[in-house]
Image (spheres, rainbow, N blue to C red):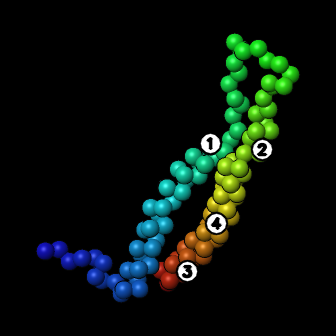
Amino acid sequence: MKPNLWDAYDSFDREALRTAEMIQNLAADVIELYKTGVELNDPSPGAIQYEQSIGSSDISDPTGNAATNPRRHQRSNQLKATRIALSKSLRDVRHALYNAAAAAGP
């Protein structure tokens, strides 16, 4: 039976390594979900029906509809909160990298 490499570490070191691995795994999910959120938040013009006669009151306003859409507004706020959280996370990960490098150095 092979010895478990994790057994060589103290419990708090194992927890730190698991946390680092979790951050690494979640990063790919954050990237994909953020890209999807940006694509969904991008307003796209509605399809134009050429077969229908258009009167002056029937003209749609896709820009106005996108601007007043509550789901789009909520998604914009969530994307903004994600950008803020990512900025803070990057600062914290850089701080952790600096401390790990200082601990590993001579």
First in sequence: mark 2 or mark 4? 2
**Residue depicted at 80% across the width and 24% down the height:** 58
**Residue depicted at 78% across the width and 36% down the height:** 63
**Residue depicted at 70% across the width and 38% down the height:** 43
Residue 85, picture quadrant: bottom right
Q: Give the mark toward the camera: 2 or 4.
A: 2
Circle 4 SS class: helix
Residue 105 seen in the current view: no
Q: Give the mark toward the camera: 3 or 2.
A: 2
First in sequence: mark 1 or mark 4? 1
Q: Is residue 31 left or right of residue 41?
A: left
User: Measured along the vertical axis of the image, is residue 36 above or below residue 45?
Assistant: below
Q: Is residue 74 left or right of residue 25?
A: right
Circle 3 SS class: helix
First in sequence: mark 3 or mark 2? 2
Q: Give the mark toward the camera: 1 or 3.
A: 1
User: Measured along the vertical axis of the image, is residue 42 above or below residue 83?
Assistant: above
Give me the disc on residue 69: none
First in sequence: mark 1 or mark 3? 1
Circle 1 SS class: helix
Query: What residue is pinned by disc 3?
Result: 99
First in sequence: mark 4 or mark 3? 4
- Image x and y of residue 29, in percent: 49, 55
Query: What residue is pinned by disc 1?
Result: 39
Query: What residue is pinned by disc 2?
Result: 67
Q: CA distance from mark 1 to mark 3?
A: 37 Å
Q: Give the mark toward the camera: 1 or 2.
A: 2
Q: Give the mark toward the camera: 4 or 3.
A: 4
